[in-house]
Image (cartoon, grey):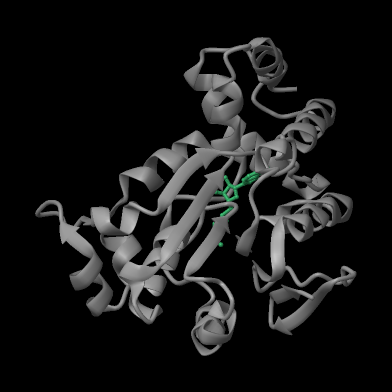
Amino acid sequence: MDKMTLSKKEFALFQDYIYAHIGISLSEQKIYLVQARLAKRVKQLGLDGFTEYYHALLGDTSGKEFEYLCSLISTNVTSFFRESKQWEFWKANLSTMLAGKNNRLRIWSAACSTGEEPYSIAMFLDENLPNPAHFDVKILATDVSPRVLKEASNGIYGPKAIANLHQGYLTRYFERCDTQGSYGIKDAMKKNITFRGFNLVTGNYDIFKHKKFDIIFCRNVMIYFDKPTQQTLVDKFFEMLNPRGYLFIGSSEALTDARKGLKSRSASIYQKV
Ligand SMILES: C[S@@+](CC[C@H](N)C(=O)[O-])C[C@H]1O[C@@H](n2cnc3c(N)ncnc32)[C@H](O)[C@@H]1O
């Protein structure tokens, strides 16, 4: 077999590794996709094939190769104000959600990719809170991939990323960075956001022991996890939500096995009751 063809045995090694360390469950059909993505890295490192790469991955105690693998395997597609119906729901229910909050809001964007989601949250709140300056808002934005986190904290977006963003948002919350059509999010929209690395599957949830959230956004990532992993994650989110807090998930990720205590409020929106 050609050394740049991923054998079933090699695929199984990566399948197990990726499941254990990232939580992503890869079906047998993904063999060609994994082969294509890893082949580039194998060539780049001048290795002899996938088995050698697998050993390099296991032997890399710096964690750098794991980080690289994360960016090769996971899909980072995202956009500003993705899933428009959820933003409409939030706008329509914002005043009820704020009742009893004492102007304090804690929000977690749990797989934030390149930052469009947490910045959309910040812009949404600035635009819709009755008096934003009087609110204590904190947004935690996490992802497993350091590469996307870096882009997120830079907050600079090219013409493609901002193409569908309403002109009003662009004018109010961004400034032009160059002549190529890139825009940077203003510092005022960054100041309430903390970006940090966190692996939803293997991460140590003790760091959240004293944190409770009013809304958790975990959108378009659970789809890559299998049912038991999804279930464990939803149980954790449940614990981390304040009473009457909300969980927003991706529109293709409905919680089929309803979790006791989480009530569906709208498509892909659940509330702790
Ligand atoms: C498709 S993006 C979704 C981004 C955003 N939430 C949205 O809906 O537009 C999925 C993100 O999940 C991240 N991800 C994948 N596995 C993860 C894990 N085990 N822990 C944390 N983040 C993970 C990826 O790095 C990627 O940035």
Residue nearest the observer in this picture, 269 or 213: 213
Residue nearest the observer in this picture, 147 or 43: 147
Determine the residue positioned at 88% across, 72% down.
Answer: 258
Q: Where is residue 77 shown, x and y percent of the image?
A: 51, 57
Label total for image = 0
Determine the residue positioned at 52% across, 12% down.
Answer: 46
Q: Residue furthest bottom?
A: 92
Determine the residue positioned at 79% across, 35% down.
Answer: 15
Visible residue check, residue 53: yes
The answer to whether 135 appears left or right of 188 in the picture is right
Examine the image and state in which quarter residue 161 appears.
bottom left
Q: Where is residue 154 shown, x and y percent of the image?
A: 31, 44
Q: Quadrant of the C terminus?
A: bottom right
Residue nearest the observer in this picture, 42 or 207: 207
Q: Quadrant of the N terminus?
A: top right
Determine the residue positioned at 72% across, 17% down.
Answer: 51
Q: Where is residue 160 shown, x and y percent of the image?
A: 32, 62
The answer to whether 56 appears left or right of 180 in the picture is right
